[in-house]
């Protein structure tokens, strides 16, 4: 009985690690997209000003 309980807990931990790893990767992608969006937004004014020079 104890072995089955330990094995069950191990399976739950493994499943949680896989789920959290996927969540981490998704959040990292969102962060990278946010950084790129800010970079584009910050460079846009200088591009527009360049049209008037």
Image (cartoon, rainbow, N blue to C red):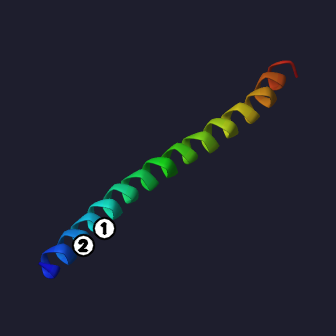
Q: In x, y percent, where is residue 27? A: 49, 48
Question: Quarter holding the C terminus?
Answer: top right
Location of residue 11 by image quarter = bottom left
- Position of residue 30 in the picture relative to residue 14 (left or right): right
Q: In x, y percent, where is residue 30? A: 52, 43
Residue nearest the viewer, comparing 53 with 21: 21
Residue nearest the viewer, comparing 9 with 47: 9
Residue appearing at x 27%, y 67% in the figure: 14
For label 1, the SS is helix
Q: Would you say the residues marked 2 and 1 are in contact, meaning their CB atoms lie under 8 Å apart?
A: yes
Q: Is residue 20 above or below residue 51?
A: below
Location of residue 17 by image quarter = bottom left
- Position of residue 10 in the picture relative to residue 30 (left or right): left
Q: Is residue 52 above or below residue 47?
A: above
Q: In x, y percent, where is residue 44? A: 73, 28
Classify 10 Å Cα crowding around label 2: few (below 14), some (14-19), many (20 and above). few
Query: Which residue extends farthest front?
Result: 1
Picture disc at residue 13: 1
Classify 10 Å Cα crowding around label 1: few (below 14), some (14-19), many (20 and above). few
Residue appearing at x 78%, y 22% in the figure: 48
Q: In x, y percent, where is residue 12? A: 26, 64
Residue appearing at x 82%, y 26% in the figure: 50
Residue appearing at x 80%, y 20% in the figure: 51
Query: Which residue extends farthest right?
Result: 53
Residue at mark 2 to residue at mark 1: CA–CA distance: 5 Å
For label 2, the SS is helix
- Position of residue 27 in the picture relative to residue 14 (left or right): right
**Residue at the disc numbered 2:** 10
Picture disc at residue 50: none
């Amino acid at each position: 009985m104890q072995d089955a309980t330990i094995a069950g807990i191990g399976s739950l931990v493994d499943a949680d690690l896989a789920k959290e790893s996927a969540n981490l990767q998704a959040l990292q992608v969102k962060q990278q997209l946010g950084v790129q969006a800010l970079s584009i937004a910050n460079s846009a004014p200088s591009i527009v000003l360049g049209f008037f020079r």
